[in-house]
Structure formats: C-alpha cells, structure tokens
Amino acid sequence: MDATVRSEFDDRTNSTNLKMARALGLFSLGLGVWQLASPRSHAKVVGVDDAPDENLIRAIGLRELGSAAGLLWGSEPAPFLWARVAGDLMDLSMLANAMGSREGDRRRQIARSMLAVAAVTLPDVVASLKTTEHMPSLSRSSDDGSADVRASITVRASADEVYRVWSDLGGLPRFMTHLESVTDLGGGRSRWVATGPAGTSVEWEAETTEDVPGSRRSWRSVEGSDVDNSGTVELVPATQDRGTEVRLRLSYAPPGGTVGRVAAKLLGEEPKQQVSDDLRRFKQLVESGDITRSEASPDGIRSTRVLRQRPGQPLAA
C-alpha cells in the first residue's frame, strides 16, 4: 500500500472511529442526564427501586457526563472510551451484587439489566481498541506494541560503586518498585518477576549479553518469556568530577501489546516516568544508603505507589 492510499485509508479509519466515539458520547450524555434528573425512574427500570440509592445513581450519572464531555468535545477520545469500559465493569459488578440479594421477578429484571450493560460493553471495548490504535499520543511505537524508554541521572559515586549496585540483581527491587524479585540463576541468566497493569504478575528469564565492570551492562529476555525486553545501563564519568552519569535504556513489549500499554498509562504507570522515578530512588540509595519518603520523593506522599514502595536498605560495604 503506497503512502497516498495509506493516508486516505487512515483518514477514513480515523473518521469512522471518531463517529463511533461521538455516538457513544451522545449515549453517555443521555444516560447521565436521566440518572441525574430522575434517579428513581432509572432505579425502577434497572430493578432496584425497592431500595434505590439515589446518591449512587447520581454519582454514576456524573461519571457518564464526564465521559460524554470527553467524547463529544475532547481531542483524544481513547482515554474516555476506556473510562466507559471501566464504568461498564463497575456497573456489572454492582448489578451482580444487587441481584444476589433479590428473588423472583426482581432478580430476573436485574439479570436483564446486566445483559443490557453487557451489550453496551462490547461496542465500548471495540471503539476503545480501534481508537487507541489510531490515536498518535496513545498509539504503539511499533507494530508489536513495543516501547523504547531512555533516562539518565548523575550519582555522586564512582563508576565502580554504581556498577556494584547494578550487578547485584537481587537488589534491583529495592529501587525499582515494579519488580517483585530478581533471582540470579548463574551462568549469566536470571529470573525476573514484576507487577504488570492492574496488579497482574509477569515473569521472564533474562541473559546477560554484555558485562564490562565499571562501564556497561546489558541484558535481554530469553525466548518464550512473558515480556520480550532488553536493557542497557551505561556508566559515564560526569563533568566537573560530579560523580557518574547513569544512562539507562529499556526496550520492551508490554503484556497485551498496545492495550496493555494504554492500560498502564491510564493506571498511572507511564513507562518514562516510572524509569525516571526508579533512577531517582537509585540515586538516593547509592548516595545515602536509604530512600526517603517525603513530598520531594520520587512518588510523593499522596501517590498510591508510595504504599508499595519498599524502603531502601543500606549498601553492603
């Protein structure tokens, strides 16, 4: 397919996806207005009018209006489409919980409502996938959804000391919070376990491809791993005798491809920011032997990631 034909095809695809997003936005708008204006009538249709929670229904209505605003007037509909998918799953969960406490006709009415929500979930998912694939700011960087992340930081320590910390594979989870464990298997191989999007767990084995003490270390996952990835840490003397500049490059294909990458972004796991935060924790660990939790820390005191952040451990002499 030549460039002109491809451009025309992409334009038609983007136009179709945008129309789908706008249609779902109008649906959210109508549903949200109904839920806000008449929560009791909505509860009656759903089948929970025997014990309606009007405040909850209004809250759901506000959620729908938020999605509608993004889909009808926003420049990038993908995040709002995924928000609709998340809302659909929440609604199904709440309806399932309500059905469990009811019997007879009311139980069957709630079951019909669940089928209706499930029927809406399908176009929401399809629109989310299609729009994500063709939105530049959320699209994958290559056909397989892989990403390339680079970051650097200057550490007030010698290259040998920095290298010693990086070569201690079991110690990497001390400052890389997405890692659960790294086990040295010997012979240049290691097993990695990490937290993926939405709390999932992924595991892979890696092999060292280059190891120059005090200068450079590279690795890559072996064939058949859950996550296809590779990485290099390069140590360069910083200017004006300020220590060592640590340059880190990671290339990986996230679980679930583009969908997994977008989900990670929506859940606050932006790869570039995550790697930068890891390096800041690494700097703290090397320079002070500990990782400080404060408003100035890499995660901040209000971030949920702080709750998962493991305290730094003093470096062995």
Image: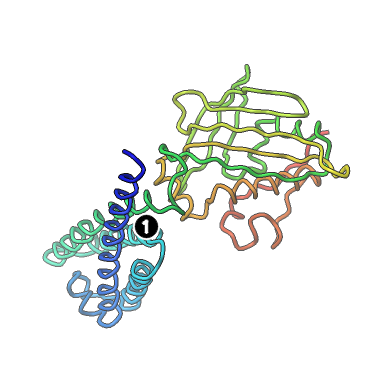
Q: Residue 222's spot in the image, x, y percent?
A: 51, 24
- Residue 306 relative to residue 1: left or right: right
- Residue 309 relative to residue 317: left or right: left
Amino acid identity at mark 1: Trp
| Above or below for 274 versus 181 | below
Q: Residue furthest left?
A: 105
Q: Residue 149's spot in the image, x, y percent?
A: 58, 42
Residue found at x 42% / y 45%: 260
| Above or below for 269 versus 87 | above
Residue found at x 30% / y 79%: 36
Q: Quarter of the image for the N terminus: give it.
A: top left
Q: Nearer the viewer, residue 14 or 132?
A: 14
Residue found at x 59% / y 25%: 190
Q: Residue 235's spot in the image, x, y percent?
A: 75, 34
Residue annotated with mark 1: 82
Q: Residues within 10 Å of mark 1 (few under 14, many from 20)?
A: many
Q: Quarter of the image for the C terminus: give it.
A: top right
Q: Nearer the viewer, residue 1 or 91?
A: 1
Q: Residue furthest bottom?
A: 37
Q: Quadrant of residue 166?
A: top right
- Residue 86 relative to residue 34: left or right: right
Q: Residue furthest right?
A: 241
Q: Nearer the viewer, residue 79 or 240?
A: 240
Q: Quadrant of residue 39?
A: bottom left
Q: Residue 7's spot in the image, x, y percent?
A: 34, 48
